[in-house]
Amino acid sequence: MTSRTVFFDGAYFEAPEGLSVEEWLTAVKADPRTDDGMKEWAGKLAAAFRDAGVE
């Protein structure tokens, strides 16, 4: 685990290198293959990263 790792929704997730949390979330939401449920979940994961101090 690194400083970019959070425990969320029963699993560990690591923020992607080279992207801020906001850049990642924007990319997820812009992807036409992402449905509304996944966009909502990604927003919650981004909030967990922010709460953990990951930028």
Image (cartoon, rainbow, N blue to C red):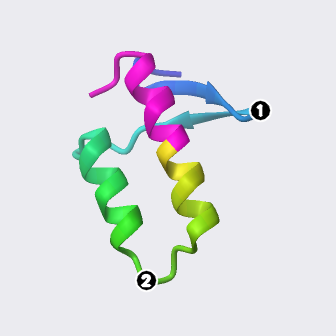
Q: Which residue is mark 1?
A: 10
Give the mark toward the camera: 1 or 2. 2
Type of amino acid at the residue the image marks with label 1: Gly
Q: Identify the secondary structure beneath mark 1.
A: loop
Residue at 43% from the left image edge and 18% from the top image edge? 51
The answer to which of marks 1 and 2 sits earlier in the sequence is: 1
Residue 31 locus on image (x, y percent) = 39, 76
Residue at 41% from the left image edge and 38% from the top image edge? 15
Q: Magenta includes 43?
A: no
Magenta residues (range): 44-55
Label placed on residue 25: none
Residue 40 locus on image (x, y percent) = 56, 54
Q: Which residue is mark 2?
A: 32
User: Which residue sits furthest right?
Assistant: 10
Type of amino acid at the residue the image marks with label 2: Pro
Q: Quadrant of residue 32?
A: bottom left
Q: Quadrant of residue 12?
A: top right
Task: Judge the density around disc 1: few (<14), some (14-19), many (≥20) Cα neighbours within 10 Å.
Answer: few
Q: Is residue 28 left or right of residue 23?
A: right
Residue 23 locus on image (x, y percent) = 24, 51
Residue at 44% from the left image edge and 28% from the top image edge? 49
Q: Is residue 55 left or right of residue 3?
A: left
